[in-house]
Amino acid sequence: MSNVLRGAVAAMLWIASASGVAAERIYILSQEGAVLSEVASGADAPADDANIKLEKGPALLALAPDAPLAYVTHSDLGQVAVVDLDQRRVVRTIDVPGSPFGIAAGKDGRIFVGDWHEDHVIAVDTAGEGEPRLTKVRVGRAPAHVVLSPDGEMVFVANREDDSVSAVRTSDMTVVATIPVGHAPFAMTLSPDGARLFVGNMQGGSVSVVDTGKLAVSDTWKTGAMPYGAAVTPDGGRVLITHQGGGTVGIFADTDTALATVKVGSYPEGVAIGENGTRAYVANWFSDNVSVIDLGTMKEIQRIKTPAGPRAVAVRTAP
């Protein structure tokens, strides 16, 4: 390769890396379509070969923080599917007791799964060969979403039928606190520093802001109808809440007054942040698409067509 060509290639790679656009991939979990779709940034639909077939009824999705893997829960099957994102295929299924629903993935090879019907959170050690080691602890009724603290030391569980959040220490899987929140907590997200937990109370039309140091609610924000999904920008400056009942997304800062309410598709559920914090992706369950929101203008700028029933979305910056 000539020096000129080497220089041109290096320049193109630098531009792609600096923009953060070329390497970003959006992963969309469609329940009725039973697929995990990979979509390139800026595309309006998955490529023909980018729909990864799954077993029926996938529920929720978590990306491994340090490997090209996705974990997908199947509540009706009692399984978690492990998807190799580079190979675009399921490489393993893990049997998990009960009805696995919410899921979070840690850097140590463990995943944390909420058992919706049996009221447990289960730590699954996926490292190594053979059957994974399972450790479970009882939490509140109907554990929904599960989120892991940035340091991996605490997992938080939204107990939908108990109006509470369980804080579980991951080192020994012990419940260290049960925090009362609003009515029917479902989705949660943590600030980047892990200091605040935002809990969407689906039947309460509110968000409980939890101080994770004190393990207590420090504030309550009023939201639109049926807050169902939650995400925070990387700088912690914006909190996004999807309103399933109103077909909107509320964008909040540090108060209960939304900076903007953005109209999206029908029954928005999962939401994820991408493009270095400048874009949000919202899974519209009943519209069979994903809304793309520009967080600078706080307006919807695109819709990505998906297979039937998109309910969860995640973003990965690929190497």
Image (cartoon, rainbow, N blue to C red):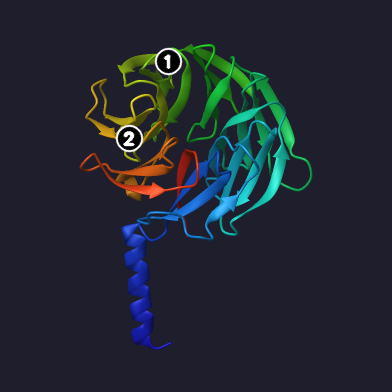
Label whose residue precedes the other's in the sequence (2 or 1): 1
- Residue at the outermost right position: 130
* Secondary element type, mark 2: loop
User: Does residue 102 appear left or right of residue 195 in this picture?
Assistant: right
247 vs 219, nearest the viewer: 247
**Residue 78 shows up from this direction:** yes
Q: Tell me which residue sits at (58%, 18%) in the image.
A: 142
- Residue 87 point in image, percent of width and height: 60, 59
Asked which secondary structure carries label 1, the reply is loop
Task: Give residue 43's position: percent from left, percent from top.
Answer: 38, 57
Looking at the image, which is closer to me, 107 or 304? 304
Which residue reaches farthest bottom?
Answer: 2
Say which amino acid is labelled 2: Gly
Q: Is residue 197 visible?
A: no
Q: Position of residue 2 (x, y in %)?
A: 39, 88
Where does label 1 land, which residue?
203
Q: Which residue is mark 2?
A: 236
Q: Quadrant of residue 188?
A: top left
Q: Which quadrant of the view contains residue 9?
A: bottom left
What separation in Å lies between label 2 and label 1 (alpha carbons)?
A: 26 Å
Q: For the residue marked with disc 1, what is the amino acid? A: Gln
CB contact under 8 Å: marks 2 and 1: no
Q: Is residue 133 left or right of residue 1?
A: right
Residue 201 spot, x, y in % from top left: 42, 18
Q: Which residue: 46% across, 26% down?
A: 187
